[in-house]
Amino acid sequence: MSNKHAQSRRVLLLGNEACAEGAIAAGVRFYAGYPITPATEIFERFAYRLPALGGVCVQMEDECGSMHALLGAAAAGQRVATATSGPGFNLVQEGIASLASAELPAVIINVQRIGPSTGSIHGAQMDVMQAQWGFNGNHQTIALAPSSVSECFWTTVRAVELAETLRMPVLVMSEMHVGLMRQAVELPDYDEVRIEGRPRPTCAPSDYRTYLCKRLEDVPPLADIGSGYRNVFQVTTHGSETAGGGGMVWDYKEADWHLRHLAAKVLHRRHEIEWVEPFATEDAEVVIVAYGSCVSAALAAMKAARQDGRRVGVLKLVSLWPFPEDAVRRHAAKAELVLVPELNLGQMVREVERVLGPSGIPVHPINRVDSYYMWPDDILGVLNAMAGR
Amino acid sequence: MRTEVRFAGDGGQGLVLAGIVLAEAAGVYGGHYASQSQFYAPVIMGGPSYADVVISDSDTAFPWGTSPNVLVALTQRSFDHFANRVADDGLVLTDPSLVPERGIRADRVVPIPAREIAERAGAAKAANMVCVAAVAALTGVATLEHVQKAIDARVPGRLLDANRAAAKQGWDYAQKVLCGREA
């Protein structure tokens, strides 16, 4: 359904529509996709909005095709996005790896549903590990997880900026519960949404190399195809000064550079990428570490527990990858117990355990996989049981 | 203050549209926190379906339904399934012509001839908007003006007049019920 108030400030929007609007506000003008529930509204919104903005929205033959259309459009200088869900997220993995290796920017929105495989059209957070480990090779991913309609907008804006400035695919890990929820939200004037773009070459075309940079953590400047600079994009392992050919690299030093560079350009900036929001963690004996749709249940449980005189806090994770480990360590430092509610059988809890393990703070998972959102009572029940009530 | 409304019935009765109109009236035009979600069976029409609306003063309100303060039940099946799950002080708004068996305490049930009112307004299909306006009047979460503004924005043109009229008459009917209750 079209929304007749797209330009006014306060609107009722689907989470999915807000993802599309965020991308558009951040300058995305190319979308290639394949429809799939519960992500199709993102596609529909782009199809409705992009032609009037001079952009292109194209339905491809499948998700693999979508990803490679993004690759070409990104190389030609466009800000690009696609959206999918569940089984489609399996199919985009090859493209994510290609974009990562070729160092081309794109935003991939995954509105998670239950799996494995076709699974069902139910809400879930079951692909959060796949976001980091779903593709082959050793690429450090960036993934953001919205917990509300407003965050659908702003995580997508930020995802476009991170993709462009770091020349890489960035994931928005939405969920059916968030994507198919409508909320009244304030949208900014899109002219006020200013994001940094990709780094551009300042050298002469003859000195330009697609991957040339000084330090491992640098992001090589990127020239558009057709701009007079010669690009050689490589999905094969390559060195920094590679001039072309596109064949396999046999030099172990170049392989070492390539893999360490892909990790370093992200991890060197991990504190800029880190996006968390603490709620009353200063004095908290129990800290609930939550992301996505579980944040609402965590906040409601915190409110009820605080009214009961119990010192409970919440650490909301918006950035999931790279895992915001310093923030988790900092905000759980004084906790006697950390709870991790998730709509899976325990995925991000492994990261929390890894980070807090040395401190000895017990970490307790709370899991739902029955298609419902996390209820405040699911968390309160565990809090009560732990307090011996 | 948190108000939860659930519109429940079968696919094709305009339950999701009812939820959208109420959420837009309260959230966009009324400036409250408003969140709307839905459930429907994987069929186009005729399967069980419901839409939830949460309206609150708090920006961090739990956005999904827990136990509704007002249930609008437009099929016997949805009444039987949800009527006992309303909040302690909750109400069940229902059309007796659609829900003949109402086996809960009579003071919890607000009967409203929504289909008949909608037919008089010009389209039996607009029974959903009769209920939206009645819920707004009974709970105070939105004004009639804001409900009608949301109808203007969300309902297709050829059914606009009937839907606006249905909302007006639903509002008036609920006002009368309220007066009756207060007297």
Image (cartoon, coloured by chain):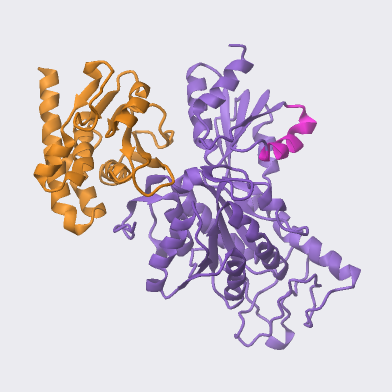
Chain colours: A purple, B orange
* Image coords of residue A251 (percent x, y): 90, 72
Instruction: Please tell me in which quadrant of the rendered image residue B79 appears.
Output: top left
Magenta segment, principal secondary structure? helix
Examine the rendered structure and indicate whether residue B5 appears above or below residue A190.
above
* Image coords of residue B126 (percent x, y): 19, 45
Residue A357 magenta-drawn?
Answer: yes
Using the rendered image of the protein, determine whether residue A335 is visible from the camera's viewpoint: no
Residue B39 magenta-drawn?
Answer: no
Q: Residue at x 80, y 62 (%)?
A: A259
Instruction: Please tell me in which quadrant of the rendered image residue A100 appears.
Output: bottom right
Depth check: give the residue in front, A82 or A226: A82
Q: Residue furthest top?
A: A389
Depth check: give the residue in front, A160 or A47: A47
Which region of the structure is painted magenta? A347-361
The C terminus of chain B - image quarter: top left
The N terminus of chain B - image quarter: top left
* Image coords of residue A162 (percent x, y): 60, 60
Using the rendered image of the protein, determine whether residue B92 is visible from the camera's viewpoint: yes
Q: Is residue A379 left or right of residue B41?
A: right
* Image coords of residue A310 (percent x, y): 55, 18
